[in-house]
Amino acid sequence: MELLVAQLLNGLVYGVLLFLMAAGLSLIFGLMNVVSLAHGSFFMLGAFVGLSIFHLTGSFWLALLLSPLPVVAIGVVMEVLFLRPLYARGHMDQVLLTFGFTFIFYDLVQTVWGKVVLTLPTPEALQSTLHIGVGVFSAYRLFLIGFGFAVALLLWLLLERSRIGAMVRAGVDNAEMAAGLGGNIPALFTGVFGFGVALAALGGIAAGPVLGLYPGMDTDILIPAFIVTVIGGMGSLRGAFVGSLLIGIADTFGKAYFQSIALFLIYLAMTLVLLIRPQGLFGVKFSDVSPPSAVTRTESASTRVTFIAGLVALVALVLLPFVLPEYQRALIAEIFIFAIFAMSLDLILGFTGLMSLGHAAFFGLGAYTVAVLGAQFGLNAWLGLGAGVLFAAGGAALIGFFCVRTGGTSFLMLTLAFSQLVFSVALKWRDVTGGSDGMALAEQPGFLGLSLSNSLVMYFMTLLFFVAAYLALRRLINAPLGRAFVGIRENEARMAAIGYPTRTYKLIAFIVAGAFAGLAGGLYVIYNGFISSDAVYWTASGDILIMTMLGGAGTLIGPPIGAAVFLLLKNVVSSYSDHWLSIIGAAFVFCVLFIPGGIWGAVQKLRWQGSAP
Amino acid sequence: MNLLEIDHLTCAFGKLVVTDNLSLSIGEGERHVIIGPNGAGKTSLINQIGGQLKPSAGRILLHGRDVTGQSPSRISRLGVARTFQRNNLFQNLSVAENLQLALTVRFGNPLDFFSVAARDQALAARVRQLLQLVHLDGWDGRIVRTLSYGEQRQLEVAVALASEPKLLLLDEPTSGMSPTETARMIELIAALPRTLSVLMIEHDMTVVFSIADRITVLYYGQILASGLPDDIRADPRVREVYLGMVH
Ligand SMILES: Nc1ncnc2c1ncn2[C@@H]1O[C@H](COP(=O)(O)OP(=O)(O)OP(=O)(O)O)[C@@H](O)[C@H]1O
Ligand SMILES: [Mg+2]
């Protein structure tokens, strides 16, 4: 009984922290239609800034009071300078922009505060324990619960009773209507964004004494907060509240009583809700996000010119390794593998119009299948590769089944959430996967009787797979099935009206993309001889997304170009700078702001202009 | 048996009832025109037949078969095609591709992942036929967004006809068209084979009376009158609420 009550309280504490996050996310989404992926970063920044203030002043309360201020300032600058110019362009670009910032903030925290777990002591006044009825409770935890409920009440009053609240509610229903009410929309947006950031920062510092402070706490809170908003319903404060407490308690009890499946419990809850009520428990509106704007014209079926150009490129790639030193051959082999990975993402992103933030999950499934089957059963890596492709396709079928039931922003959040689930399994199932230490490939296979330790053999093996994957995907894109994917990207409602069961087609695209990602993952293990949970972390999904978008989504040539530029740059930069993450983030932001069609898109544009009369 | 049978259909957006216990039937080969003031619920009715909107009560029967609340793609495959009040095309694809998508799902193999869609000669021939029908011959390669509004309207109809439906739903096909384009559209609709039934929403009274076998007047989600064109013309209530008011 005592334990039960204690668990319930812990669940409430976690729920309250989730609420501080989810409320802001939900408000911002409801009003502006933007899911801020940087929201977890503000939580993390709030905690770390609070820690520094605590070290300076020695007062927890001052830290709690002051730490949101600089964080809000950062958030407001981000909204005004970066998000605002993009309102006209569609929400997906804004979401991507916030994603870019998560990299930068992550790097910032790592640089300023280091990579280790830091602790923020519980404020002295609340260090005591209270004896109430059946048990002993930490005063700080009780305070947190009270604090959270007070914030919830305040928010509710603000929304329901005040003029600003009325404007926000009107904005949630209809932005133009709110403008008609005489509201100053840009100021309202900035205000609500800043307010949401303040809640997240408060949550971060309040969580400090309970959860600890570490780089990575951003996603650790963001993902469950996403799950809360998906369950509660996007844009609903009541949904955020009920969902937070539900998930907080369910997760805490799960971890206490069903350790082995605790990880899956909240995902199970989420999938159940999605099956029964796709818009969430209290959801009123579906997220409506247009497909990514980074969509360029699709490749035409091969003409003689493209055929010759392709042939020339192929000959160049065949001759290239003979003039390169060994080390650079290996680098290019890696580029071929990531080119396959990027093309697979492009199939859903650029061609079908589905923005996935969790594509690394399928890369990981392919990679781990090869490594684990090799280690556990001594299976040959080539057979493992076949199994890996199938396994990744199966995983994509399962995850995709839930994801394609939603669209736009929910799709994006779900793919991210599921990929973090795959990551957690890779991390926690240490006996099999080696967790963050990773696992080595038991035995490197030969290739056509040759040894892959020879860099030339490795180069040609990966080139072969790359060319095969490129041709297969090109064939697919120009075939009726691929045209159907493009039709869905362009106008899903019309596709349904002319007879395409669009959900099924989206699922097919998702599975095919998963299979090719699995192929890339399996090849990567064979190439690298090693795989660790880092390969399925959300940053890996971010890497592949930036490669695809940088090169040019919606074309098949763009992603390989993006992979090449990204990996070459990384290779050069990381040799003399530790701030690779910030550079990726900045590149992301730059790409979204200035070259939405990617490098290849820009090249094509020039070509069209050049050929215009 | 009637081709389409609408049976006590009801649908509401919150408190606004847009389809109010409405019953209507359309026979094989019939040209049925729905008229009514703005906001009468005409588009909403078409949306329920097409599956884009789910009614809250009542039934929709197609060939006697209950299709109420089924998905748009399923209803389309049962032989219902539609156009939209606002052009709803694949703006960044070519004219030919717009038609190919509609043709493939009906007559081809949309799951084919290997043959090159653009090289299908039979498909291309059918595309040319359809374009000729809507007076867009030779426009195959044009990107849709570069067409004029009226031309896009014509393409809307071609995309709907591509699947060779049994029932064609047209939501104001002549809106935004020039007089010449309108005349051609009337001609086109009038020349459609009688194996096909047409349910059409229209505001332009010349168009209405030149096409309709029967006319239904909608008013606040209810049927104010339904019958032969001459009866509708003579109906005093219709004159009062509608004919005198619009155009
Ligand atoms: N998605 C929606 N949500 C809320 N109300 C809607 C929605 N769609 C339509 N309405 C309302 O329902 C009513 C009927 O709309 P509908 O489009 O069916 O009218 P209509 O007869 O086609 O009008 P029009 O001649 O202007 O095309 C209108 O008052 C409209 O504002
Ligand atoms: Mg209408």
Image (cartoon, coloured by chain):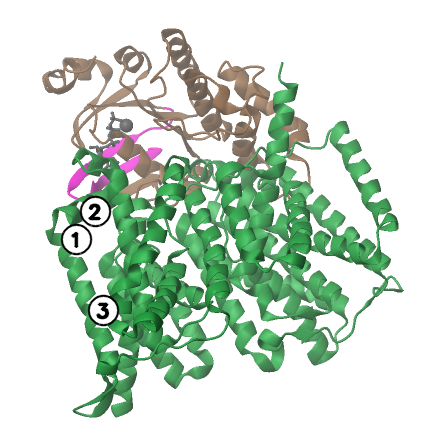
Circle 2 packing at 10 Å, graded few (<14), some (14-19), many (20+), is many
Q: Which amino acid, mark 3?
A: Gly
Q: In the visual, does B228 lie left or right of A332?
A: left
Tag 2 residue? A168
Residue that appears at 79% across and 39% down: A313
Q: Position of residue B107 (x, y in %)?
A: 57, 35
Q: Which amino acid, mark 1?
A: Leu
Picture quarter containing residue B127? top right
The span shown in magenta is B1-29
Q: Earlier in the sequence, mark 2 or mark 3?
A: 3
Provide the secondary structure element on which disc 2 rests. helix
Tag 1 residue? A159
Is residue A21 in view?
Answer: no
- Considering every residue shown, the one lying at the far front of the view is A56
Q: Earlier in the sequence, mark 2 or mark 1?
A: 1
User: Chain under label 1?
Assistant: A
Circle 3 packing at 10 Å, graded few (<14), some (14-19), many (20+), is many
User: Chain under label 2?
Assistant: A
User: Chain under label 3?
Assistant: A
Tag 3 residue? A148
Q: Position of residue A388 (x, y in %)?
A: 66, 65
Contact between labelled residues 1 and 2, with CB atoms less than 8 Å apart: yes
Q: Nearer the viewer, residue A243 or A271?
A: A243
Residue A577 lies within the magenta run:
no
